[in-house]
Image: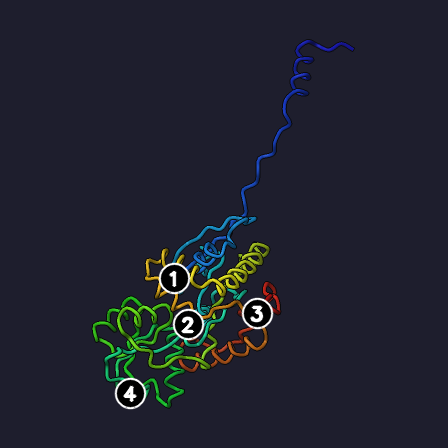
Amino acid sequence: MTTSRRGLVAATAALLAPPAVPRAAPAATLRAGSQKGGLQSLFEASGVARDLPYRIDWSEFSAAQPLLEALNADAIDIGSMGDLNFFSVYANGAPIKAIGATRSDGASQNIVVRGDGPIRSVADLRGRRVAAARGGWTHYSLFRILEAHGISPEEVKIAWLLPAEAALAFRSGAIDAWSVWEPFTSLEVLQFGARVLADARGLTPSASFLATSETALRDKRPLLADFVARNRRGWAWAGGNLREYAKVTARLTRQPEAVVERAYTVNDTRAVPLDDALLREFQEAVDRSATYGIVSRRFDVRQAIDTSLTPPTQG
């Protein structure tokens, strides 16, 4: 058998050519929503975002409501928000699930008044103008604090305002008190002389969720499980490094470092398991919230929560 010169050259070239390198597949991506100074700050400050086997595309949101809207619209895969904000949206039919939780001290949800003002007790709020954000922590904690002191919500004049609007109204004297949460409380106390009138210790779960869409839970479960684990490690780091964490967040949010550090100290946030005890607290909060008109209906909170990505104990 003879071989043509052209065929011999082609065969030799094929033998000498370097092996073909397969083109790398695009890296898996998790689209994460972060409220300003929230998840992204934690992941970067703690170092848990290093050596990721996938890419995180961060989007920043001004508050929980637009973040939840993005989650409902499948514009992001995961984000963090207060428990009652989540339950309010879930109750209206959003295809979302909570897959992880953190807990803060109830002192992080409170009612503030001006330090030099005449209001000295919760009873003094009768007939006064009190601001709160509708449908979340401050709505629920305001009603619970009033209830604990024997006051009906109808006995106060509630102005439903978002934090930016409420801050201006509070400082100008247009409202008498503000149902608010950290870090807004620390900003008012340290920068504007406000005083904490009462807080929600023992009255609310004071929890936040990592929540995802049902689509992402189906298609990106391994990435979500890794993200939940990194979030847990991030909060473990933050608990022992509050000052360093506050420095990073203060730089990102352009807030005074002392304000952020005070807020983090009051919050005392830590990752917690989605265990039966916590689920019972959520159920009580949802049942009360339905009575208060914060959520549109009663439901079994277990339907809204997927516990499979959170270990029964936190290590």
Mark with earlier residue (4, 3)? 4
Q: Quadrant of residue 200 in the image?
A: bottom left
Vertical comparison of 300 with 23: above or below: below
User: Mark 3, residues whose alpha carbon is within 10 Å: few (<14), some, or many (≥20)?
Assistant: many
**Badge 2 amino acid:** Val
Counting every numbered tag in the picture gives 4
Which residue in the protein does label 1 denote?
66
Which residue in the protein does label 3 denote?
273
Q: Distance between the residues labelled 2 and 4?
A: 25 Å
On the question of residue 168 being in view, the answer is yes
Q: Which secondary structure lies at badge 4?
A: helix
Which residue in the protein does label 4 denote?
124
Q: Where is residue 135 in the image (x, y as percent from the top left)?
A: 38, 73
Q: How far apart are marks 3 and 1 (CA)?
A: 26 Å
Q: Position of residue 114 (x, y in %)?
A: 26, 77
Q: Of the residues tagged 4 and 1, which is closer to the observer?
A: 4
User: Mark 1, residues whose alpha carbon is within 10 Å: few (<14), some, or many (≥20)?
Assistant: some
Which residue in the protein does label 2 denote?
266
